[in-house]
Image: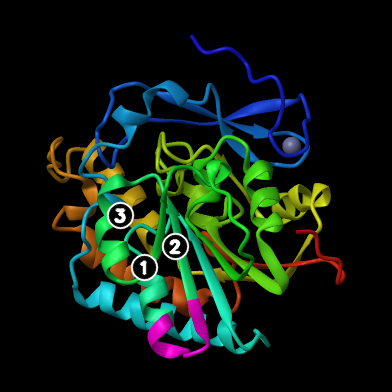
Amino acid sequence: MSSMPVYCPVCKGKDTSTWSVAKDYEYFSTDEEFTYYGCDNCKTVFIHPVPHDQLKKIYPSNYYSFVNKSKGVVVRLKEWLDKRFFKNILKQLPAQEINILDIGGGTGWIPDILKRSDNRIRFTQIVDIDEKAKSMAEENGHAYFEGPIEAFSTDKRFHLILMLNLIEHVADPLVILQKAQSLLAPGGMIVIKTPNTDSWDARLYKKSYWGGLHCPRHWVIFSAANFQLLLQSTELKIKKLMYTQGAPFWAFSIIAAWYRRKIVHVSATKPLIFHWSFAPVSALFAIFDFLRRPFAKTSQMFIILTKEGKTFES
Ligand SMILES: [Zn+2]
C-alpha cells in the first residue's frame, strides 16, 4: 500500500486524486504498479511514492537514451524537423559567440547538428548521468560532465540551454529550472520538451496506460497551465509554447492496450520501442498529430523560456 502524497510538487496543494495506476509496459523493468496522482488545484500529475531507490532497476542497461539510435526513416524525418526547429531558435540569438548546454544530452547528437548549422557556436557542454555516452560526446568535441545537473558547476554562461525530455524525469522540477536559470547568459533561451497531460491521448488512455507516463520514469507531468504556475517562483518567463506531435505516446498507449488484450505478443526482454508495430503506429500518429496540431493540443510541448528583464546574476 502506498501512502497518500503530502502535497503537489508545483502548487503545494494538499488535495489530490488518483489519476492513473500504471506498470512499466515499455521495459518490463518491474512488475510493480505505480500510482500517479493529479492535483485537484493545478492538475499537475505526479508519481507517489517517487521510486528514488530503484533507479538502477527502472533505467535498465538497454534504456533507449543509452543505446545508439538506429537511422530509420522516422528517425531521419524527426532529425530533419528538429534541425529546422533549432535553426529557427538559433536565429533568434543575437550573440556573436554562442555557448550551448544540453542537460541530459547523451552523446550530444543535437549539439552536433547545431554546430553544423551555425558557425557562431564556440562551446558545447553536455551534462548527463550516462557514463557510456561520455567518450563519444568528447570525441565529437563536447565538454562532458557525468552526473546530475544539480552537481554541475562552471563559470561559463550559456546562450542556449536544452532540456529535452528531462524535466518530467525529476522529483523537484523547480530545482532544475532554478539551476538552468543561474547558468543562462543574458538574452539566452532555455528550450524544454515535455509531455502534456492536457491532451486527447492522455485523457483517453490514463484509465488503462498512457505512453506519456513512461511509467515509472516520468515523475512530474505538466500542462501549459501548471507549467506556467511553476515559473512563478523563478525569474523565467515563457517566450513561446508550441505543441508538437506525441506519436511515441500514442504508439506506447496503443501497443500496451493490444498487449493487455493479447492482440499482439510482446517480449518482456525487448523494449517496446523495438516492437515491430512501434514504427508503423508511431509514423501513422505522427501524421495524425501533425494534421490536427493547428486545432488541438497534442501530447508533447516545446517551451522556450527567457529570463525576465535584463538583470543578470553570475
Ligand atoms: Zn498543484
Q: Position of residue 44 (x, y in %)?
A: 66, 41
Distance of label 3 from label 1 (alpha carbons): 34 Å
Q: Secondary structure at mark 1?
A: helix
- 181 or 97: which is nearer to us? 97
Precedes in sequence: disc 1 or disc 2: 2
Q: Which residue is mark 3?
A: 134
Residue 128 position (above or below residue 116): above
Query: Is the residue marked by circle 2 packed among few (<14), some (14-19), or many (20+) residues within 10 Å?
Result: many
Q: Residue at x 36, y 76 (%)?
A: 112
Q: Secondary structure at mark 3?
A: helix
Precedes in sequence: disc 3 or disc 1: 3
Distance of label 1 from label 2 (alpha carbons): 8 Å
Q: Position of residue 196 (x, y in %)?
A: 57, 55
Q: Are marks 3 and 1 in contact (CB under 8 Å)?
A: no
- 163 or 41: which is nearer to us? 163
Mark in the foreground, 1 or 2: 2
Q: Position of residue 124 (x, y in %)?
A: 46, 70
- 104 or 9: which is nearer to us? 104
Mark in the foreground, 3 or 1: 3
